Image (cartoon, coloured by chain):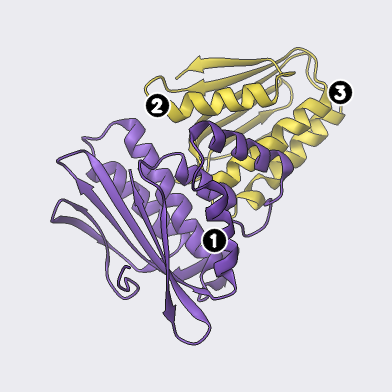
Chain colours: A yellow, B purple
Amino acid sequence: MESLHIEATENSPKITMDYENGIIEVEGKSYPENTFDFYAPILSWLETYCQNESAKQTIIKMKLTYFNSATSQVLFDFFDHVVEGELENLEVQWYYEKDKKGSLRDYEDYADEFSDLNFKAVEF
Amino acid sequence: MSHSLYNSKSFLQIDTKKLCEFSNIITEKSIIETVKSIENLLVNLSKDKIDDLSLIMIEVLQNILNYSIDTKDLGNNKRESKGTFTISAHSKNNSFTIQTSNIININQKDTIIKKYTEIKDLDEIELRKLSREKRRSKKDLHEKGAGLGFIVIAMRVSEPISIEFIPYQEDNLEFILTLHL
């Protein structure tokens, strides 16, 4: 399985999906016009990663500064895949900005919704 | 009742001073430019406020692309439509008024009212709960639905969302959204 890298644009995040080291990172703003199309290859990669023998440890780093409502839906799909994948030694690092109310609220919502995953809040 | 805004100019102003004007053609690029203008011209605001304002503009402008009767498919997954918007900052109380205007088919009125009615009396905790339910059920996934977008907006405004419909040629309506934050 190959790693997947997508560079950031002005309205879409940088994506790093490093198969060998088990690092999955989403960083930046996310409001592409066709959000579902943008994330389709990412969800597909994640599904395959979860089905295959993954790395010994997986760290998911969510470093989204803000995201549109369509992205918030896609993130549910994203974490559904992770839950179904039953990855061993998984850690989800959700980066938040202390002085932004919405940032912590997002962490709380996803951590609570996907309480089986090992969510950790990390300050930017 | 508001007067028509559809043929007005789109702009960002502080009190009565216009800082910039925008094109009335809404595209992905114009949405990015709007967000950049907010970030660059309203530098004295807190990050929280800038993000709230940016997110609201992203949602309302993407909704214009999703809903407008005149939205054109430009190919390569790009679209454009005509829409007007104003962002007015009020320095006295550090607040904003946003107004948007676009043309929709009369058949969409009931859908918008239904989604609006669902959220208009909810407090922040109830809005968060509903937002999670909608994301979980994926009801609006891949569909043109302002359900989640409306919730994102409602969680960030300081006064209830105001919507109006003004008759506009044959079976169409001008949809005017007014927001305060």
- The numbered mark 2 sits on a residue in which chain? A
Please state which of residues B45 and A86 is positioned toward the viewer in this rendering.
B45
Q: Which mark is residue B113?
A: 1
Task: Let me know if residue B3 appears in the view.
Answer: yes
Q: Position of residue A75 (x, y in %)?
A: 65, 36
- In the rendered view, does B123 fall on the left or right side of B32? right
- In the rendered view, does B136 fall on the left or right side of B20? right
Check if mark 1's residue and mark 2's residue have beta carbons within 8 Å.
no
Q: What distance separates the C-alpha of mark 2 from that of mark 3?
A: 38 Å
Residue where numbered disc 3 is placed: A53
Q: Residue at x 51, y 26 (%)?
A: A105
Q: Which mark is residue A100?
A: 2
Q: Which quadrant is the C terminus of chain A positioned in?
A: top left
- The numbered mark 1 sits on a residue in which chain? B
Position of residue B101 relative to residue A51, above or below, is below
Nearer mark to the viewer, of 1 and 2: 1
Q: Quadrant of residue B29?
A: bottom left
Q: Residue at x 33, y 68 (%)?
A: B1
Residue type at numbered disc 3: Glu
Residues tagged by mark 1 and mark 3 found on one chain of the structure: no
